[in-house]
Image (cartoon, rainbow, N blue to C red):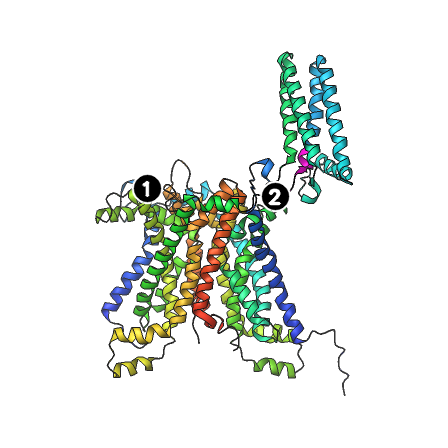
């Protein structure tokens, strides 16, 4: 850990970061070029910077509506799955119930199954229930992805809280549910928040269900909406690069604000502490 | 002494535990396990959404009351139009009416309560309500009735056809309508479409399935292997104190955090034969002959999707491995250095064994993700050119929603499911109880 970082190290590091960021840099530089230059030249910088691609990206497709749809669906999914998952994670890690291993095994299995295996029955169900092209029609299938994920991550956070806290709460006459709601849950709040970010990102990024269930343009989410910028006859790269920059900004902000938590959530449970 | 407050009904800890677990278990059962079983059941039928006679799972000869009632109404309606435009058709129309009524009477007698159900369906149709309840609209019918029904409809269709030959001009359209409506009425009869394992035998004997399977395996092995190797190098590189750690961490998280579909769109642009910078540079460097080959040849397409996946996921892999590296006590390396072990020996005898389970967990989750790859390929190449980058999930999706063949598509999705189950069982055997450590008290 205390290895010194020399100049060679920083050069390697800058190359690595540059390679990782290169697609974003190029897409951004393209998005501010005038239409004509996109197709003809591989110049990095354009002398005629313009924002016409941004105006066009927002005009040709309802990009902001897609973002709103994604936001609502991801938020609802996160709230529902965090509530249900925190109950389960608490019970599995801290209450004297049987079959804990079996329950966690089921959760793990549920987080591994391929979404395509449930797609057609869920499609039929959502169609019969009249939920195609609605927020709820996506929130229900998204629970299949987010609930196992949330239980899996939350349980690593719950188990780290010392058990003695519950014992003293019990001595003070708190009921088991009060102990959960007033003592353990608030203590686990940072972990809950971390889990919520990961669940939110997973729901924001989902493609397969969104593509199949919400087929009306006004109900599309960001990932599906972006993939429909391509038309059969022409590929409007100017619009696409501008749209990509617009939808990447919220993610960049999220990552910059919460990078520590995201890493903590991603690595929780993959290493023994 | 204060009176103890009157206590409400309380759950003890164990009861509360089960009550708290219940919602998740119920949700998992209803929206994951039940649909998987339904997929398996669907895969045993010749079930196609775009073919009205196969748009349901039918185990025995049945009639769709919705189609039947709808067409019956249309036939009677059109007969009125014919009556108005062609007075000479009277006797044929009477024949049709009596033939249909006779069949109708017999149908309603085949099952008790059928008359009531028919009425209910009819009322719903009159109110323009869709009939979604299968128990209401589908009913088994005897073969004898079906034969008579089909024969009667064929006979009347022929009669209408004959009538049309010398019909006055105004009557041609209603007669054409009548003919097709009579023939459509036959669609109400649903032949059983249970085919057993035929979808499996057919699609497992199909070259495209195996190509998709091999593409998926190749994609999984190559991407996870390369991601692990590069990820490990990067993790070893950044496992030290340096300025700008947070910034580097944020930079590598962004590719992981953006939607795969957005990443795929970006790479479609970068690999494009005309305006793609990657394709341009690779051709300039002589790695490829022509900028166009990346997205227009099978090998180029496979390279493109793998490259995009490696770009998107290596940083994530590096972060997982870095977290593993940081748990290794420094004293181990110091002791090894004292014993004269060089860097390579240290890596193989300390680093690798110490983070074995971190590697296995990371590889397990990555491999499962890679094996079910859908959005990256679907957006970047669409499975093309000529299905050469099609993964098994993409093929299953195309069968399900582009060809609307729910039977075959379900069979493929069951195959994906079984492969994933097999893959994860192997990994979990390898990882063992480490997977649950940190979640359960031993």
Between circles 2 and 1, the one closer to the viewer is 2
Q: Do discs 2 and 1 belong to a common subunit?
A: yes
- Residue under the point 78% across and 40% down: B112
Q: Quadrant of residue B253?
A: bottom left
**Camera-nearest residue between A89 and B241:** A89
Counting from the top left corner in percent of width and height, residue B385 is at: 36, 42
Relative to A8, B206 lies left or right: right
Whether B326 is drawn above or below A44: the answer is below
Give me the residue at 37% from left, 49% from top: B266
Residue A171 visible (yes or no): yes
Mark 1: secondary structure: helix
- Classify the position of the N terminus of chain A by image quarter: bottom left
In this rendering, the count of numbered labels is 2
B84 or B29, nearer to the observer: B29
Q: Give the range drawn in magenta.
A: B56-68
Q: Is residue B91 above or below residue B18?
A: above
Specify whether residue A195 is painted magenta: no
Residue matched to label 2: B57
Rendered location of residue B355, percent (x, y)? 37, 72
Considering depth in this image, is A207 or B390 the residue closer to the camera? Answer: B390
């Amino acid at each position: 850990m205390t290895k010194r970082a020399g100049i060679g190290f920083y050069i390697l590091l800058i190359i690595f970061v540059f390679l990782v960021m290169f697609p974003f840099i190029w897409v951004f530089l393209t998005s501010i070029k005038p239409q004509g230059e996109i197709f003809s030249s591989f110049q990095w910088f354009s002398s005629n910077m313009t924002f016409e691609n941004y105006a066009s990206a927002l005009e040709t497709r309802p990009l902001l509506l897609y973002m709103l749809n994604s936001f609502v669906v991801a938020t609802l999914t996160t709230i529902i799955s965090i509530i249900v998952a925190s109950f389960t994670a608490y019970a599995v890690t801290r209450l004297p119930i049987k079959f804990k291993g079996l329950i966690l095994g089921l959760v793990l299995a549920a987080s591994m199954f391929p979404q395509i295996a449930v797609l057609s029955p869920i499609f039929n169900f959502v169609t019969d229930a009249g939920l195609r092209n609605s927020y709820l029609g996506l929130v229900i299938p998204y629970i299949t992805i987010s609930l196992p994920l949330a239980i899996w991550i939350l349980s690593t956070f719950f188990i780290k809280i010392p058990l003695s806290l519950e014992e003293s709460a019990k001595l003070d006459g708190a009921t088991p549910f009060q102990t959960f709601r007033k003592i353990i849950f608030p203590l686990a709040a940072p972990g809950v928040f971390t889990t919520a970010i990961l669940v939110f990102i997973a729901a924001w990024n989902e493609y397969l269900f969104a593509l199949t269930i919400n087929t009306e343009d006004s109900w599309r989410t960001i990932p599906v909406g972006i993939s429909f910028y391509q038309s059969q006859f022409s590929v409007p790269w100017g619009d696409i690069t501008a749209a990509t920059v617009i939808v990447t900004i919220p993610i960049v902000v999220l990552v910059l604000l919460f990078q520590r938590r995201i890493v903590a959530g991603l690595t929780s449970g993959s290493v023994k502490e | 002494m204060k009176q103890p407050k009157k206590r409400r009904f309380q759950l003890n800890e164990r009861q509360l535990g089960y009550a708290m677990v219940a919602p998740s278990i119920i949700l998992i059962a209803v929206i994951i396990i039940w649909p998987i079983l339904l997929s398996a059941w669907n895969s045993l039928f010749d079930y196609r959404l775009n073919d009205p006679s196969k748009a349901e799972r039918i185990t025995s000869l049945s009639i769709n009351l919705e189609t039947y009632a709808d067409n019956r109404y249309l036939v009677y309606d059109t007969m009125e139009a014919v009556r108005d435009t062609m007075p000479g058709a009277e006797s044929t129309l009477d024949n049709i009416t009596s033939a249909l009524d006779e069949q109708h009477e017999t149908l309603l007698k085949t099952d008790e309560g059928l008359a009531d159900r028919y009425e209910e369906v009819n009322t719903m149709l009159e109110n323009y309500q869709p009939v979604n309840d299968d128990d209401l609209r589908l009913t088994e019918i005897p073969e004898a009735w079906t034969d008579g029904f089909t024969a009667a409809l064929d006979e009347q269709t022929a009669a209408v056809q004959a009538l049309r030959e010398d019909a006055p001009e105004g009557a041609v359209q209603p007669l054409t309508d009548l003919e097709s409506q009579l023939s459509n009425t036959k669609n109400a009869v649903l032949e059983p479409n249970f085919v057993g394992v035929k979808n499996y035998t057919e699609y497992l004997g199909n070259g495209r399935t195996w190509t998709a399977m091999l593409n998926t395996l190749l994609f999984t092995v190559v991407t996870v292997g390369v991601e692990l190797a590069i990820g490990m190098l990067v993790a070893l590189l950044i496992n030290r104190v340096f300025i700008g750690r947070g910034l580097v961490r944020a930079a590598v998280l962004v590719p992981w955090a953006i939607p795969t579909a957005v990443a795929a769109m970006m790479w479609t642009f970068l690999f494009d034969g005309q305006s793609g910078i990657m394709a341009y540079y690779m051709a300039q460097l002589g790695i490829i002959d022509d900028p166009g080959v990346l997205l227009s040849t099978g090998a180029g397409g496979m390279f493109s999707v793998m490259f995009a996946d490696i770009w998107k996921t290596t940083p994530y892999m590096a972060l997982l491995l870095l977290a593993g590296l940081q748990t290794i006590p420094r004293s181990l390396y110091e002791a090894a250095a004292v014993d004269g072990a060089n860097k390579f020996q240290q890596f193989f005898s300390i680093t690798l064994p110490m983070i074995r389970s971190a590697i296995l967990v990371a590889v397990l989750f990555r491999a499962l993700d890679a094996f079910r790859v859908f959005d990256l390929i679907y957006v970047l190449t669409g499975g093309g050119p000529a299905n050469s980058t099609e993964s098994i999930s993409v093929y299953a999706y195309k069968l399900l929603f582009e060809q609307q063949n729910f039977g075959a598509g379900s069979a493929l999705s069951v195959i994906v499911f079984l492969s994933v189950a097999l893959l994860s069982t192997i990994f979990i055997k390898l990882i063992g109880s480490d997977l649950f450590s940190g979640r359960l008290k031993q």
